[in-house]
Structures are given as C-alpha cells and as structure tokens.
Image (cartoon, rainbow, N blue to C red):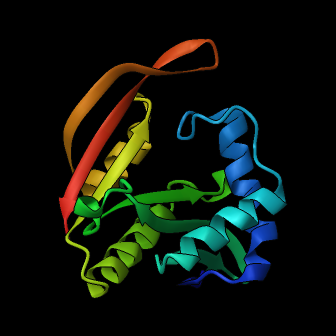
Amino acid sequence: MSLLIRPSRDDDITSIAPIYAESVKTGTASWEYEPPSVEEFAARRREILAKDFPYFVAELDGNVIGYSYASSYRSRIGYRFTVEDSVYVSPAAAGRGVGKALLNRLIDACREQDFCSMVAVIGDSNNRASIALHEACGFHVVGVFPALGFKFDRWLDCVQMMRKI
C-alpha cells in the first residue's frame, strides 16, 4: 500500500465527485439532498482554487480514494485568518488512516499560508468517525447546535470543532 497525498488536478474530478455524491446520498456529513453534477462539482473546486485555498486528493496504488480542501469559514474580512476544512473518503477506504493523512496535510498547507485557525462544521452529532478524526488531529468541540438541519426525515445537530494552526 502506497498512499500519496497530492494537490488535486482537473482530471481528478471524475474520481472525487462520486465520493461526494455517495456521501450526499447515504450520509449526513453534507446536508445537500441531491448530489451536484460533475460539472457543478468541478465549478465548486475551481472557485476554491481561485481563492488560493489548498485542495488535495489521496491516491492509493493509482486510484483516488479521498480528498480534502480548505475554504473560507465566513466571508467577512475579519474571518480571513480562519478556514473551514472538508474531508471525504471513499467508503471502501474508510478506517484506514486516509482521512487523517488528508486532514494533516491540509492543516500543514494552511499553516504554510499563514492561516491561524481551522474550523470543522460536522453535520450530525452521530458522525462519530468525523468527530474522532478531528479530535485525533487536535480539534476540540466548541459547540453543538441541536436540531439545526433536516435530512433523511430527521433533525440533525451541527457540531462545531476548532483548532489553532
């Protein structure tokens, strides 16, 4: 097994869009109900890169199995030193350290860009894997918004985690 974390490329879209689509269809990490088209997903990636945020993929034996990126936490100028992270891993690669490798590389890249804080906005307080991943990477819970969102016919909490970088 040779795991490689590298900057994403345009041609990775056909591999990472389905990872997100699966999460939208089956999970509560994203509160979208319908997965975006590959074209919409590509446009979202371009927007993130245009703002000079890092965007990585995890590649195992030549196959993309996950991705991570940073984005603006909020749009107001006072938040410019804080980023929000996003990490998604293919279900087939879950529990193998891929998410941790992606998140740690993202933290390092954001530190190199002089960001000071990273926030994780975790959909669903039952998402123990994401909460545990963030805790393992130095995040701590700073708040929980109970029943903030609705998906799959149930109310979901939103867990806010943070770490200094």
Residue drawn at the location 82% of the way across and 68% of the way down = 14
* Residue 116, x across and y down, in percent: 19, 71
* Foreground residue among 73 and 9: 73
Along the horizontal axis of the image, is 60 left or right of 164? right
* Residue 45, x across and y down, in percent: 64, 68
Q: Measured along the vertical axis of the image, is residue 67 above or below residue 88?
A: below
Q: How many marks?
A: 0
Residue drawn at the location 40% of the way across and 65% of the way down = 100
* Residue 128, x across and y down, in percent: 39, 37
* Residue 53, x across and y down, in percent: 46, 76
For the C terminus, give its image quadrant: bottom left
The image quadrant that residue 62 belongs to is bottom right
Residue drawn at the location 33% of the way across and 35% of the way down = 159
Using the rendered image of the protein, determine whether residue 11 is visible from the camera's viewpoint. yes
Using the rendered image of the protein, determine whether residue 139 is visible from the camera's viewpoint. no
The image quadrant that residue 147 belongs to is top left
For the N terminus, give its image quadrant: bottom right
Q: Measured along the vertical axis of the image, is residue 59 above or below residue 72?
A: below
Q: Measured along the vertical axis of the image, is residue 12 above or below residue 152?
A: below
* Foreground residue among 106 and 45: 45
Residue drawn at the location 56% of the way across and 77% of the way down = 49
* Foreground residue among 16 and 44: 44
